[in-house]
Image (cartoon, rainbow, N blue to C red):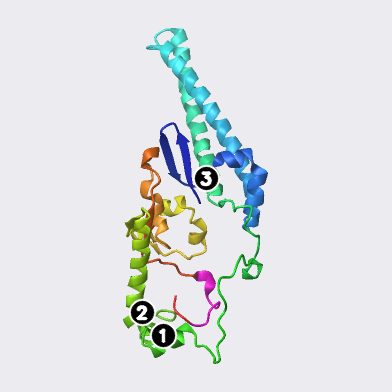
């Protein structure tokens, strides 16, 4: 899900969260079309709007009952006169009615949010709609494809022959599709990270090595519901924490619950972290190599 930015006067409110509810209310057909293009059932929008209408009606009703309750409380007093006793009784009934409505409101809000979490961000109109890599469009090609007078080797064959990756020992330790990086491959990895950091720091980015464990509500707020539901995320049950699938999962909410002034913006961060993902849906896609 996107980071929503709202400007008001000299302040800028940054909210990490779900698709803007007002967009769904005002342009439901646009949202339906957008999420359908991403393979999500557009009927979710109708279900959300129905629950949202119920939620808004209950909210208005509860506000009215509370207002009525306050008026009664001011006129009831000690309840010593017949009129005051009657008002006291009415006040108790109002309290019970408010409690009942609040319980219904909580249920509607929970159901509404559950659906909202399933509605993805909308794609740009220029993004082609497709179901596989075959539907991708080539925008441009840079340079010429090399032509070899011999059969080129794949990266794993080269890495083994140059002692850069050791998959045999890694298989004993961790299982298939794992590897030890060695020698120049290690130096190259750190050199590339250093190059990226130095390049972006010159452009005003702040380097961050973020936490790799986050609370469930953070994953939820970052819109990683599918990442969790597809079982690509690693969940530490004992601590109820998720291992991040990329550094953005913990950098995105860095300023959550904060109000940033416009003279503090933009905030630019470059992150580096280990990324944990099961790649549950990719088994069998590639028969060899390292994850």
Task: Tell me the residue at 54%/46% (across/down).
Answer: 19
**282 in the magenta segment:** yes
Which comes before the other along the chain, label 1 or label 3?
A: 3
Tag 2–tag 1 contact (CB < 8 Å): yes
Q: Circle 3 is placed at which residue position?
A: 113
Relative to 202, is 27 above or below? above
- Where is residue 14? Give x, y as percent: 43, 42
Q: Does dot 3 land on a helix, a strand or a loop?
A: helix
Q: Nearer the viewer, mark 1 or mark 3?
A: 1
Q: Circle 1 is placed at which residue position?
A: 159
Relative to 272, is 84 above or below? above
Label 3 crowding class (10 Å Cα cut-off): few <14, some 14-19, many 20+? Answer: some
**147 in the magenta segment:** no
Label 1 crowding class (10 Å Cα cut-off): few <14, some 14-19, many 20+? Answer: some
Q: Does dot 1 land on a helix, a strand or a loop?
A: helix
The stretch of residues the image draws in magenta is 280-288
Relative to 58, is 45 above or below? below
Q: Circle 2 is placed at which residue position?
A: 185
Relative to 45, is 80 above or below? above
Label 2 crowding class (10 Å Cα cut-off): few <14, some 14-19, many 20+? Answer: some
Question: Which of 152/91 is in front?
Answer: 152
Which comes before the other along the chain, label 2 or label 1?
A: 1
Q: Main secondary structure of the magenta part?
A: loop
What's the CA distance linking mark 2 and mark 3? 46 Å
Task: Tell me the residue at 56%/70% (across/down).
Answer: 142
Q: Nearer the viewer, mark 2 or mark 3?
A: 2
């Amino acid at each position: 899900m996107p980071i929503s930015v709202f400007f008001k006067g000299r302040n800028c409110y940054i909210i990490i969260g779900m698709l803007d509810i007002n967009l769904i209310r005002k342009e439901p057909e646009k949202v339906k079309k957008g999420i359908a293009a991403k393979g999500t059932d557009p009927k979710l929008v109708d279900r959300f709007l129905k629950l949202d209408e119920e939620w808004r009606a209950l909210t208005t009703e509860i506000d009215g009952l509370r207002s009525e309750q306050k008026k009664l409380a001011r006129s009831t007093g000690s309840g010593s006169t017949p009129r005051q006793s009657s008002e006291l009784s009415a006040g108790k009934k109002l309290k019970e009615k408010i409690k009942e409505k609040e319980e219904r409101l909580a249920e509607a809000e929970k159901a509404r949010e559950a659906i909202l979490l399933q509605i993805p961000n909308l794609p740009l109109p220029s993004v082609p709609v497709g179901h596989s890599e075959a539907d991708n469009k080539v925008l441009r090609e840079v340079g010429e494809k090399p032509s070899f007078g011999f059969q080129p080797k794949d990266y794993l064959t080269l890495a083994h022959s140059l002692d850069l990756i050791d998959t045999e020992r890694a298989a004993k330790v961790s299982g298939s599709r794992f590897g030890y990086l060695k020698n120049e491959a290690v130096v190259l990895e750190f050199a590339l990270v250093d190059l990226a950091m130095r390049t972006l720091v010159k452009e005003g980015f702040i380097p961050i090595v973020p936490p790799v464990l986050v609370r469930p509500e953070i994953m939820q707020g970052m819109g990683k519901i599918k990442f969790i539901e597809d079982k690509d995320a690693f969940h530490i049950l004992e601590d109820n924490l998720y291992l991040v699938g990329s550094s953005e999962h913990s950098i995105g909410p860095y300023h959550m619950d904060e109000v940033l002034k416009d003279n503090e913006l933009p905030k630019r961060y470059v992150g580096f972290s280990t990324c944990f993902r099961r790649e549950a849906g990719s088994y069998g896609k590639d028969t060899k190599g390292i994850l």
